[in-house]
Image (cartoon, rainbow, N blue to C red):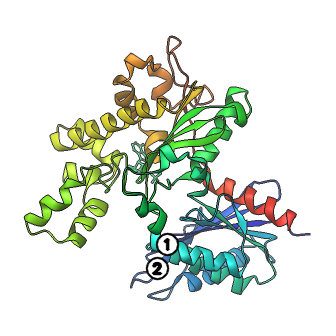
Amino acid sequence: MNQSILVVNCGSSSLKLALFDENEKKIASAMAERLNQADSFAHIDGDNQPIALPTNTNHKQALQALVSAFKEGRLMSEAPSSIGHRVVHGGETFREAVLIDDSVVAAISNCAGLAPLHNPVNLAGIEATREQFPDTPQIAVFDTAYHQTLAPRAFLYALPEAYYRDWAVRRYGFHGISHFFMVNEAARRLGKTPETTSIISAHLGNGCSITAIKDGLSVDTSMGLTPLEGLVMGTRSGDIDPGLFEYLRTRGVALEDVHKVLNHESGLLGISGQTNDMRTLCELANNGHEPSALAIEIFCFRLAKYVGAMMASLSHLDALVFTGGIGENSLQVREKTLSHLKLLGFNLDANNNDCHGRRTEGRIEHSNSRFPVLVIPTNEELVIAREAKRLAQAS
Ligand code: AMP
């Protein structure tokens, strides 16, 4: 019997599919990009032949095209046994992954006010697969759910209590699927169980967040009501003084423009004036471009401060863990960040950091470091596939 698991990840203009077999091995993956734009395109990973898409392809059409391409390539012959969807915002309604039915669809739609760019496209993906595979169990796995274990002292803002009561204004946190993977994988590598493992997990990609995990549970995290708060990111500012809004108003800047600037024109891009891409920034900085060097400096300093802040939630620390495109690949960022944390006892082994811990099961700390430091490639698709399989079998 077919036991494959399809993982669906819809972004605002992209659709990613991954197909796993019953042993949790990835068989294939594919991606459609620039959806709802004139130049939509798609490809199966590892295949040089692009998949033709009509202009303004939507998520549903892209899903059909990619599934057909899987079938033509004999990567898939029948309906998968379960389908897992990444959903960005589950509000306070979803504390864990759930089997999707009409009431779940309605609840995800209710959370759309908190993630207007993400939840509607996640729902478009769910609608498309429910239509194409009506008999297959579908599971929603939320980016926010893992952080639902935060205590009020960590999730409440110092605002009038009615903001939380009436409008659900609170810290939700994101990248939960990745942080959950980190604690499980760190525990495995350290020879512990997740339930007894406490780590600080730094997910550093185009979006960045850091989470304190105590005995397997999220207890504090840097992203907040939206994924704008916290660390410096590719194009997002992270923390700023909220007084900026009033000050910019007096300078004639409209609220929508501030929102756009903070989300799309700030962070590494804003400071460097060049790019949001850390690899390019490192090259520019090495060639003497000072604003790029400054962008990296600010990124690492903010991150180091947050590592210190996350310590306040923990009674012991088994490891500091780096992941995401930057965390996994930038030895410079890891080195610079930890250079600010000598007082806490962090110390890196330069050779192991240089090769991203690939020869040492991810370990990059010096033998005299007070805490282990690990580099672990994230695998959010695998978490979603496992949850989909588990819940489909239980249904
Ligand atoms: P992600 O969103 O996880 O795909 O991460 C994207 C970020 O990772 C971008 O800023 C990339 O420049 C960065 N990145 C990927 N590879 C490297 C590398 N070798 N060195 C530095 N940054 C990298």
Badge 2 amino acid: Leu
The mark found on residue 35 in the picture is 2
- Residue drawn at x 43%, y 76% is 34
Left or right side of 238 for 115 = right
Quarter of the image containing the C terminus?
bottom right
Q: Is residue 21 above or below residue 349?
A: below
Identify which residue, 385 or 25, lies in the foreground: 385
Instruction: Say which amino acid is labelled 1.
Output: Ser
Answer left or right for 44 relative to 168: right
Residue 79, horizontal then vertical, whole percent: 79, 77
- Picture residue at 70% right of the left edge, 36% below the top: 194
Q: In this view, does 13 lie above or below 187?
A: below
Between the residue at mark 1 and the residue at mark 2, the CA separation in whole angstroms equals 6 Å
- In the picture as drawn, the residue positioned furthest to the left comes out as 251
List the residue tagged with mark 1. Answer: 14
Q: Nearer the viewer, residue 201 or 377?
A: 201
The answer to whether residue 50 is visible is: no
Name the spot of residue 188 as percent of width and height, x first: 71, 33
Q: Is mark 1 on a helix, strand or loop?
A: loop
Q: Is residue 76 left or right of residue 329?
A: right
Q: CB of residue at label 2: within 8 Å of ligand 1?
A: no
Q: Give how far across and how far down residue 310 sits, in percent.
A: 46, 34
Q: Residue at x 37, y 37 (%)?
A: 303
Front residue (pair 81, 164): 164
Residue 344 in picture, x, y percent from top left: 42, 19
Is 352 placed left or right of 304 in the picture?
right
Q: Residue furthest top?
A: 368
